[in-house]
Image: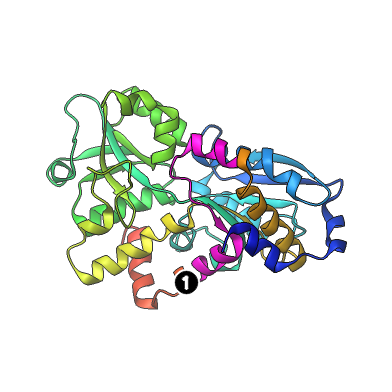
């Protein structure tokens, strides 16, 4: 069923058009300006308003901090619950619930829609660098990541624990832009963040081969990265594979928009239908495809099911996730 068909099937009453008239809807982005979440947040803000009855104003507000936890905590606990506060943050929300300081439950957010799935990578650059995953099993590499509780730091620790890599996470970078500058200056050997961000921010590194993609954090290899192993294929036991699957479930959540719990159902429906209609808009799709050729949207009703399914891990597996997340 197409996104338009799904949206129409849900049916939003005409009287529901009024709540957003004259309002401003803020999209809080859990990273700094210029990163992939910011880029796609601004893309949505430019297009979605004409599909929301009342055509509210849209603003994008970067809220970096703690690898997206700051924005998630704000949306869950303090943001208005009237549909005027949305967020795009790290996709690994279920895993990051186990980080000290996280005060939310991912499954209780109202998920509005996924713009595209995500693949995070660890890449290296510079003379004498590790270039392949077998080399990463033998030699240490200093890898720039965000906060210790960020998904990017967690992925790096998980691949160390479960596959034997020798990445040394270097914390304290506010966003992907800061991490990439550290790579340029030779402060670190590489970094872990979204493949989309690397392509958009330093396309010349990809073109000239000066950056090596050592591993990608996804269930399977991205079509644009056929030579870099996916984390799931590196697992050596069934239990480790099940565990890594929990970490990798974030790829399905991807770059998504969500609203706080407690947002009135009729307003969630308006936003989901607007998102679905926007995803079928030719100008939006053309602009999104220029940013990411493998553009693969999912409407909010289906995305809510994906998030709920990812919350079904056993307590035993989640305890192992917690141990890895917290370095135990």
How many tags in the picture?
1
Q: Nearer the viewer, residue 281 or 119?
A: 281
Would you say 22 lies left or right of 201 here? Answer: right
Residue 188 picture location, percent across and down: 30, 31
Above or below for 165 versus 260? above
Q: Secondary structure at mark 1?
A: helix
Would you say 100 lies left or right of 125 here? Answer: right
Please check the rendered image and state whether residue 294 is part of the magenta-colored stretch, yes or no. Answer: yes
* Residue 189 appears in the figure: no
Residues in magenta, as a range: 284-308
User: Can you say which quadrant of the picture contains the C terminus?
Assistant: bottom left
Q: Nearer the viewer, residue 127 or 214?
A: 214
* Residue 128 appears in the figure: yes
Tell me the residue that label 1 is attached to. 309
Above or below for 137 versus 143? below
Residue depicted at 33% across the width and 41% down the height:
224
Q: Quadrant of residue 322?
A: bottom left
Residue 264 picture location, percent across and down: 76, 66
Please check the rendered image and state whether residue 286 is part of the magenta-colored stretch, yes or no. Answer: yes
User: Can you say which quadrant of the picture contains the N terminus?
Assistant: bottom right
Dot 1: within a 10 Å radius of its alpha carbon, few (fewer than 14), some, or many (20 or more) residues? Answer: few
Above or below for 290 versus 163? above
Would you say 60 lies left or right of 220 here? Answer: right
Would you say 170 lies left or right of 28 here? Answer: left
Q: Nearer the viewer, residue 212 or 28?
A: 212
Q: Main secondary structure of the magenta part?
A: helix
Residue 312 picture location, percent across and down: 44, 75
Q: Quadrant of residue 111?
A: bottom right
Residue 16 picture location, percent across and down: 83, 61
Residue depicted at 49% across the width and 35% down the height:
291
Residue depicted at 73% across the width and 68% down the height:
265
């Amino acid at each position: 069923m197409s996104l338009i068909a799904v949206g129409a099937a849900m049916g939003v009453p005409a009287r529901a058009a009024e709540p957003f008239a004259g309002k401003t809807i803020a999209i809080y982005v859990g990273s700094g300006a210029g990163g992939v979440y910011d880029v796609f947040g601004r893309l949505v803000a430019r297009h979605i308003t004409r599909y929301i009855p009342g055509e509210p104003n849209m603003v994008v507000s970067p809220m970096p901090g703690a690898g997206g936890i700051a924005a998630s905590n704000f949306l869950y606990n303090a943001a208005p619950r009237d549909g005027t506060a949305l967020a795009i943050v790290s996709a690994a929300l279920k895993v990051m619930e186990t980080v000290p300081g996280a005060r939310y439950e991912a499954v209780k957010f109202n998920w509005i829609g996924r713009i595209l799935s995500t693949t995070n990578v660890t890449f290296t650059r510079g003379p004498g660098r590790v270039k392949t995953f077998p080399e990463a099993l033998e030699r240490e590499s200093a890898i720039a990541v965000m906060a210790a509780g960020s998904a990017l730091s967690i992925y790096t620790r998980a691949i160390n624990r479960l596959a034997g890599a020798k990445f040394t996470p270097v914390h304290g970078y506010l966003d992907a832009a800061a991490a990439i500058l550290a790579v340029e200056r030779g402060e670190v050997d590489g970094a872990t963040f979204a493949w989309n961000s690397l392509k958009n921010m330093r396309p010349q590194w990809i073109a000239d081969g000066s950056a090596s993609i050592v591993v990608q954090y996804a269930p399977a290899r991205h079509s644009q990265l056929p030579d870099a192993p996916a984390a799931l294929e590196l697992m050596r036991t069934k239990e480790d594979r099940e565990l890594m699957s929990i970490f990798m479930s974030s790829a399905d959540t991807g770059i998504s928009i969500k609203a706080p719990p407690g947002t009135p159902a009729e307003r969630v429906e308006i936003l989901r239908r607007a998102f679905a209609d926007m995803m079928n808009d030719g100008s939006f799709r053309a602009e999104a495809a220029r940013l990411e050729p493998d553009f693969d949207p999912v409407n909010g009703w289906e995305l809510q099911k994906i998030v709920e399914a990812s919350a079904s891990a056993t307590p035993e597996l989640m305890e192992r996730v917690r141990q890895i997340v917290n370095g135990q």
